[in-house]
Amino acid sequence: MVFENKGNKATRTGFGEGVLSAGEKNKDVMGIGADITSSVGMNLFAEKFPERFISLGIAEQNCVGVATGLALSGKIPVFATYAVFSAMRTTDQVRISVCYNNLHVVIGGAHAGISVGPDGATHQALEDIAIMRVLPNMTVISPCDATQAKVATKEAILNLNSPVYIRFGREAVPDFTSEDLKLEIGKGQVLKDGKDVTIISTGHLTWEALQAAFSLEKEGISARVINLHTIKPIDEEIIIKAARETGRIITAEEHQIFGGLGSAVAEVVVKHHPVPISFIGMNDSFGESGKPEELMQKYGMTSLNIAERVREMLRK
Amino acid sequence: MNTKKISFIHALKDISKDIRKDIIRMIANAGSGHTGGSLGLADIFTVLYFNILNHDPENPGWEERDRLILSIGHVAPVQYAALAYAGYFPKEELLTLRKLGSRLQGHPGRDHGLPGLELSAGSLGQGLSVAVGMAIAAKKDYKNHRIYCINGDGELQEGSIWEAAMSASFYKLDNLTALVDRNKLQIDGRNEDVMNIEPLKLKWEAFGWNVIECSGHDIAALIAAFDDAKNTKGKPSVIIAETIMGKGVKSIENDHRWHGKPPSLEDVERFIEEIDNG
């Protein structure tokens, strides 16, 4: 497979397009806004279906409760705000009202990761995957680009029937997949095959992982790249196969190295086929203000960092 | 459609006594549970399930049913007893409360399959938001059923309650009635000592609600209050129902230590006698 950047586009835009598209297909889809509707891409839906959009203001706990009531009444509520709020301000409501009742509430977490940039640490969600994936009944999705965000959002709204958290970012990032790339929630995607090492990535770090893999190819290193767009339920099969066939794994995510994608992969690997794993992500610290690309460099989450980590691992 | 609506005050009083006696038996048998609040709400639950709510124990999922959200899940015993008396499940099952494998979880859990429960709940401050969501959905779909939400007074210390209150009046949810169990007590003692919530009527009014105050033990007054709420258009209503924690068992009434304490097996007979004589 060859992937080309069709142009940079924010995954939040893809999410918004996905909500609109799902809303056109199913009249039970309802949107909930917490004051930053345009910022999370929900304006498309709100403008097209004003009668199905409920503005609730800066009151995220209430948003989740109202979504619960809508879901109990046969609606498919979509609630999105910044991930620091949708996944963390509301954790108790998500745990009890949504997950314990096992309801199809679609929760969007925007502006995830340090690539939020200048807003700084308070608005950079780096713990949301860990918190959401530990909740029973919850599905956690982290699409790799805007196109996949659209496809995954539609899928999560139209074809799931249980709680789901979808994570996306603020910045325009390479949009490289096609809507034809088959997406099955709970199944990872091998985007590039390889035999020496496997890079398992999620979110826009998948693009960085691909860049790293292609540059390593020139050095004679064959790296497999798996895009794990669903972190829960996790695709055990694709991970075990990678562990068996390549013997080394590197995980890459714009999230704390504790509790997120890396931990989820490690849980599978130690259980079924232990191999060395190296984790790329935030190393147990808060972010800070800066340009997105400066922050990605400073905290070691670029393609260069991934490639270097592969070389280190192969030297051992 | 529920065929069991009862208008005779004395008949409703008899039911509430039976419910109280079962609350004592089931919590004592469980060895843990919230006795005071459950007893205090017995008259209110009797009025709701036997006079106010449109519901059908034969068809718990009936789409046109009124919805009752119990935000204070810890008083589940009073709801379980009312559901059993209404015919949702056999009364014998009440004695399985809090036991392994029981459908009667310590706090309501729909995943265990008990019919008649609208929401798994127990973390305070969440139910009113869910009720708002249900009321919005009913309005959007032009449905006539009503949404009821039972809240505690201590629970009003949770900020999320006021987020929900703000949204209910913003969307003019006159199909929503909240009821505050105003027993003035919570685990640490009196509300006014733990964290004052007064002036309560003014607070709800400031949030755009129609406020009705009544005794939570006067059955006729409760029926009138719910009717008043139903007839109020353009805004949600809240009934602030003055109750006595532990009501019906004189020896434990108004004692906050009975918030979360079960009667001992030796207490049972004496407490039931007190209820009979009340």
Image: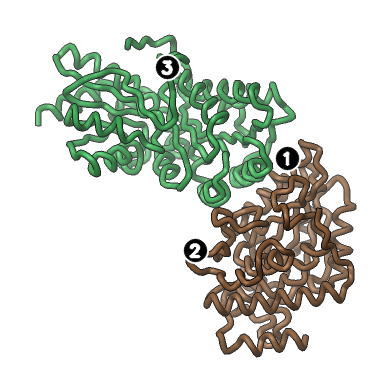
| Image height of A281 relative to B37, above or below | above
- Classify mark 1: helix, strand or loop: helix
Q: Amino acid at mark 1?
A: Ala
Provide the residue designation for mark 3: A181
* Res B87 quadrant in image: bottom right
Provide the residue designation for mark 2: B101
The hue used for chain A is green
Residue A280 is situated, as x and y percent measured from the top left of the image, at 28, 33
Residue B70 is situated, as x and y percent measured from the top left of the image, at 67, 59
Closest to the observer: A296 or B127? Answer: B127
Could you say which disc has been placed on residue B137 in the image? 1
* Res A176 quadrant in image: top left
Read off the chain for label 3.
Answer: A
Residue B272 is situated, as x and y percent measured from the top left of the image, at 68, 85
Q: Amino acid at mark 3?
A: Leu
- Classify mark 2: helix, strand or loop: loop
Labels 2, 1: front one:
2
Residue at screen point 35% across, 25% down? A227
Residue at screen point 72% across, 88% down? B274
| Image height of A206 relative to A28, above or below | above
